[in-house]
Amino acid sequence: MKLLLLLLCLGLTLVCGHAEEASSERRNLDVDKLNGDWFSIVVASDKREKIEENSSMRVFMQHIDVLENSLGFKYCIKENGMCRELYRVAYKTPKDGQYFVEYDGGNTFTINKQDYDRYLILRIVSYKNRETFQVMSLYGRTKDLSSDIKEKFAKLCEAHGITRDNIIDLTKTDRCLQARG
Ligand SMILES: *[C@@H]1O[C@H](CO)[C@@H](O)[C@H](O)[C@H]1NC(C)=O
């Protein structure tokens, strides 16, 4: 019984600690600073086929427009080896720091960590055909980021249950950079 209580307490501490960390990350979100050009640097998912070549969630970010209560995303994906440019608007949900966008199903995302001058981390929960999976994305203001930031991102992915072999460094692949205007 004592052991059970101890385990329960431990579990609650972990859950609460996590939630606190997540909310403090979002508290200082100043969306205006997200505006402008971005590059996809690393992508991760607990459903790897969604971020593999020619897949919908292997997104190559180009630009974010900060709009009223929404964010406009201009990005490319590769379909059958061809770069295709897309634009989607994500709307604020009643939940603080959360947005919703329809793209290959429904997606809610939060902006987990930001250092607007250099990088941005999104955590997306995607729903399609009653199936749910996560995608985490690291965007940079520059074409590449330091290994420190990539490592920070990888640790955050692991904290959300995404293993290292499901983390793909896109800087070594074709990111449709030639399609940027
Ligand atoms: C992506 O599509 C291209 C063109 O159809 C093909 O050559 C390539 O093998 C595809 N990649 C994967 C991983 O299926």
Image (spheres, grey):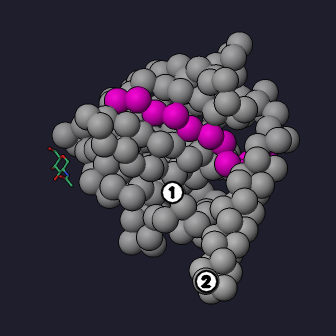
Q: Does the residue labelled 1 lie within 8 Å of ligand 1?
A: no
- The percent coordinates of residue 54 (x first, y second) are 26, 45
**Disc on the earlier residue, 2 or 1:** 2
Residue occupying image coordinates x 71% and y 54%: 19
Tell me: residue 167, above or below residue 88.
below
Which residue is identified by label 1? 42
Q: Residue at x 63, y 49 (%)?
A: 121
Residue 1, label in figure: 2
Q: Looking at this rendering, what residue extends furthest in the top direction?
A: 68
Task: For mark 1, give the secondary structure.
Answer: strand
Q: In this view, does 140 lie above or below 77?
A: below
**Residue 14's spot in the image, x, y percent?**
68, 68
Tell which of 95 and 47 is nearer to you: 95
Badge 2 residue CB within 8 Å of ligand 1: no
Q: What stretch is highlighted in magenta?
A: 105-117
> How far, Cα to Cα, is label 2 from label 1?
45 Å
Residue 28 is left or right of residue 53, and the answer is right
Work out whether residue 47 can be spotted: yes
Give the dominant element type of the magenta stretch: helix, strand or loop.
strand
Name which residue type carries label 2.
Answer: Met
Q: Which residue is drawn at 59% across and 20% down?
A: 91
- Residue at the right extreme? 28
Disc number for residue 10: none
Within the magenta stretch, is there residue 80?
Answer: no
Q: Residue at x 66, y 77 (%)?
A: 5
Residue 26 pos. (x, y %): 76, 43
Outermost bottom residue: 3
**Residue 47, x across and y down, in percent:** 33, 55
Q: Residues within 10 Å of mark 2 (few under 14, many from 20)?
A: few
